[in-house]
């Protein structure tokens, strides 16, 4: 079963706008990661946030983590055409032993 | 440093056949994980190997198996292929298993079962 669930499943925005994706998970985690996948290729690691962190930034990316709500959000600011991709959250549960991915959010940046 | 290499990139098989996929991790990485990706199910964890030992296994039938060699290269095998096995199979390597868990993915093998 999926540990993480991304929301929305798909998102289309105009270039230059901000994109926000959410991830909810079920069990307590060690850390949460976000990955990007371009059109059926391999996934690329974007950012990792530990369970004791609440917010993290990397370039145009901002990730928040709310362990009380078991949720995370990924914000991409000033979106570009190259940001068109699927975005996945991944978690490793404290009592688990593998990294589990959600089903992803498909982001489409309109010119 | 070379990335994770998966071969072949594309594969077409017929039902009942068996297939072997290969994954060469980043040099120095000892952990290799395999995932199956389908449009409906997203990424499903298959198994993870570390130092030639299978440490974790997902909920897949015994037709799916794998192994890891002493140089950390890994193979996965699917026997008696079914139509539902058509998917993108992704391999990921990591330096070690710890709470960091950052994975480096290959480009995948697209398997089509006819």
Image (cartoon, rainbow, N blue to C red):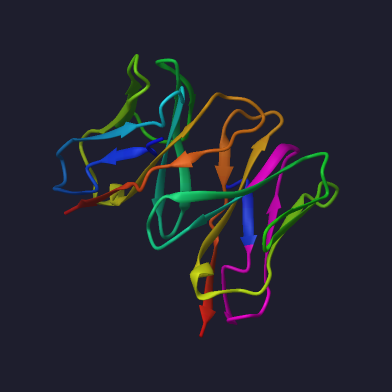
Between residues B90 and B12, which one lies in front from this camera angle? B90
Residue A62: horizontal and vertical position, in percent?
A: 73, 59
Spot the residue most to the right: A68
Question: Split into 4 quadrants, where in the image is the N terminus of chain B?
Answer: top left
Vertical side of B60 occupied by A43: above or below:
below
Question: Most prominent secondary structure in the magenta stretch?
Answer: strand
Residue A68: horizontal and vertical position, in percent?
A: 86, 48
Magenta residues (range): A7-33
Question: Split into 4 quadrants, where in the image is the C terminus of chain B?
Answer: bottom left
Q: Residue at x 24, y 48 (%)?
A: B9
Between residues B91 and A17, which one lies in front from this camera angle? A17
Vertical side of A71 occupied by A29: above or below:
above
- Splitting the image into 4 quarters, where does residue A52 fall? top right
Q: Residue at x 63, y 55 (%)?
A: A5
Residue B61: horizontal and vertical position, in percent?
A: 36, 33
Residue B48 shows in this picture:
yes
């Amino acid at each position: 079963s999926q540990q993480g669930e991304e929301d929305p499943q798909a998102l289309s925005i105009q270039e230059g706008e901000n994109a926000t994706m959410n991830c909810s998970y079920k069990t307590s985690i060690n850390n949460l990661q976000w990955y990007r996948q371009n059109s059926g290729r391999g996934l690329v690691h974007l950012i990792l946030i530990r369970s004791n962190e609440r917010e993290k930034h990397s370039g145009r990316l901002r990730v928040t983590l709310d362990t009380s709500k078991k949720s995370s959000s990924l914000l991409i600011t000033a979106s570009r055409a190259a940001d068109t991709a699927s975005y996945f959250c991944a978690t490793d549960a404290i009592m688990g032993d593998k990294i589990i991915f959600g089903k992803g959010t498909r982001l489409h940046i309109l010119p | 440093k070379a990335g994770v290499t998966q071969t072949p990139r594309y594969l077409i098989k017929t039902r009942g056949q068996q297939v072997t996929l290969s994954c060469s991790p980043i040099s120095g990485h000892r952990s290799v994980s395999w995932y199956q990706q389908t449009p409906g199910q997203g990424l499903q964890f298959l198994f993870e190997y570390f130092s030639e030992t299978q440490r974790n296994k997902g909920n897949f039938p015994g037709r799916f198996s794998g192994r890891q060699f002493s140089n950390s290269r890994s193979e996965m095998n699917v026997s008696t292929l079914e139509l539902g096995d058509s998917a993108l199979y992704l391999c990921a390597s990591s330096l070690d298993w710890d709470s960091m868990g950052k994975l480096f993915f290959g480009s995948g093998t697209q398997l089509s079962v006819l």
